[in-house]
Amino acid sequence: VQLQASGGGLVQPGESLRLSCAASGSIFSIKAMGWYRQAPGKQRDLVAVITIRGTINYADSVKGRFTISRDNAKNTVSLQMNTLKPEDTAVYYCNGGGLLRFYSGTYYYTEGDYWGQGTQVTVSS
């Protein structure tokens, strides 16, 4: 499985960006796909995840601003990012093949083995 991410860039606070991740190869194994981000000097954190059945989960920091979606026919997952803030600045990575579980009222995503290359998102005035 190969994942190709695209769509990063430099925007001002309050603006929007849309990231895309295209999957190719043995995609039948991809039940869930997610977006992570890593800011300089920080750990990589999960931003959003979507399963093949459409179950979605977001990090609290992006709820109401980011929207994840997938097109199963085109094997792509997108992340629409609105009202961007400087703290959203990071390298964004798509991940595939993980597992999203729901336990005691909380979603848990175990990352999969497939990663796209990072795409830089910079939010600055």
Image (cartoon, rainbow, N blue to C red):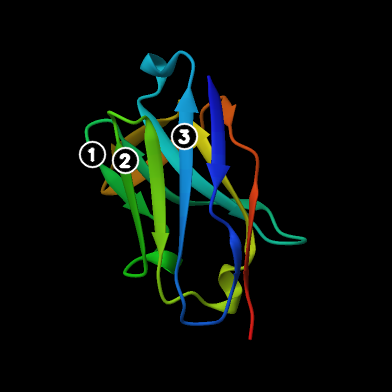
Q: CA distance from mark 2 to mark 1?
A: 8 Å
| Callouts 2 and 1 close, C-beta under 8 Å | yes
Q: Residue 111 location, x and y as percent? A: 51, 33
Q: Earlier in the sequence, mark 1 or mark 3?
A: 3
Task: Measuring from the top left, give residue 46's x and y in whole percent.
Answer: 51, 50
Callouts 1 and 3 close, C-beta under 8 Å: no
Q: Is residue 80 above or below residue 64?
A: above
Amino acid tagged 2: Arg
Spatial separation of the CA atoms under disc 2 and disc 3: 10 Å
Which quarter of the figure has residue 76? top left
> Which residue corresponds to the image point at 56% horizontal and 69% vertical from the top-left?
88
What residue sits right under mark 1 in the picture?
A: 54
Q: Which mark is residue 22?
A: 3
Image quadrant in which the C terminus is located: bottom right
Residue under numbered circle 2: 70
In the displayed orientation, state which residue is furthest to the right.
41
Which mark is on residue 45? none
CA distance separating discs 1 and 3: 17 Å
Amino acid type for the residue under numbered disc 1: Gly
Q: Secondary structure at mark 2?
A: strand
